[in-house]
Amino acid sequence: MARAVPDRDAACAIAQAAAVVGDWWSLLLVRETARGRHRFDELQRELDISRKVLTERLNHLVDSGVLDKVPYQEGPVRFEYRLSDAGRALLPVLVSMQDWADRWLLGDGSLTASADERSAEAHRVHDLPGTRLPRLTLPAHTGGALDPVDAGAGATVLFCFPATARPAPLPDDWTDIPGAAGCTLENRLFREAYERFTAAGVAVHGISTQRPDEQRAFAVAEEIPFPLLSDMDNGLSAALRLPTFRAGQALRLKRTILVVDRERTVRHVQFPVTDIPTAVETAFHEGASVAEG
């Protein structure tokens, strides 16, 4: 359970944060609510936690302002637990922890924008088919915010990429990071195939952790016809536990392609993406197959 912060650490923000989310169950509850699990029974089932401990941790996170307790049913009244603004602000911390563990605990410590097919992060991505993407919106380069899943399309292709060089220069060692280069090529290939995707009833969304203004400058220069969405706050990364790497003091998405159906269910994944032209063609065929129903 939560520990009281001793007087000697009263001014230490790390100690204060640890008192709120430093507990194993508390962190996992933040993880699961980010993934779209909001009700007591589904949280208990997913975490295999006792009702007593779950009740204690949920109350603690509500009292600490990390979760909001929201009624969803009357007679009897039942509640959902949803991330508050403060809770959503924890998502970059959660993704950073995942990135650190993927590299230093589950990996060999090397910096890479790709992955071995047998790695833990590849295993997570390959387990995504059948997962339902929770409701969320991301800032778009066109202005405002968009749902990553296009409700008007038979399928949506989400291609996640690390970063484009325009407008801001990339870190000096960018080309030395395996799998990092190729983002402009990938966007251009999706641009060239965009009419084919549209004709097949498939929407295309590009996603990176770059800011919307950076994405906008690139989209204008490259005449990108589809939305580029910014996961700069790591909402999508946390929802799907997407693989990331840190370069230039920023978390970047590893190149990953997802095909999602109308019901927001992931139907197909590609990770790692090592042959970009082939991956774009595969995304087209898989997306068209899902759109056909």
Image (spheres, rainbow, N blue to C red):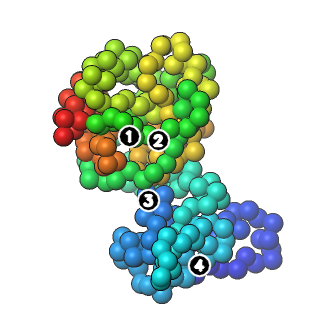
Instruction: Give whichever of discs 3 and 1 has the lower sequence position.
Output: 3
Amino acid marked by disc 4: Asn
Name the residue rendered at 54%, 64% in the picture.
Answer: 82
Looking at the rendered structure, the kind of residue marked 1 is: Ala
> Would you place residue 180 above or below residue 51 in this image?
above
Residue contact at pointers 2 and 4, CB within 8 angstroms: no
**Callouts 1 and 2 close, C-beta under 8 Å:** yes
- Vertically, is 225 above or below 248? above
Q: For mark 1, what is the residue?
A: 151
Relative side of 171 to 289, left or right = right
Q: Identify the secondary structure beneath mark 2.
A: loop
How far apart are the alpha carbons under marks 2 and 4? Answer: 30 Å
Mark 1 in CB contact with mark 4 (< 8 angstroms): no
Quadrant of the image occupied by residue 13: bottom right
| For marks 2 and 3 on the same chain, the one whose residue lies earlier in the sequence | 3
Mark 4 and mark 3 residues within 8 Å of each other at the beta carbon: no
Q: Secondary structure at mark 1?
A: loop
What SS does tag 4 mark?
helix
Whole-angstrom CA distance, mark 2 to mark 3, is 15 Å
Tag 2 residue: 147
Residue 89 at what x, y percent from top left?
A: 62, 54
Q: CA distance from mark 4 to mark 3?
A: 19 Å
Q: Could you tell me which residue is drawn at 49 percent across and 70 percent down? A: 72
- The mark closer to the camera, 1 or 2, is 1
Q: CA distance from mark 1 to mark 4?
A: 35 Å
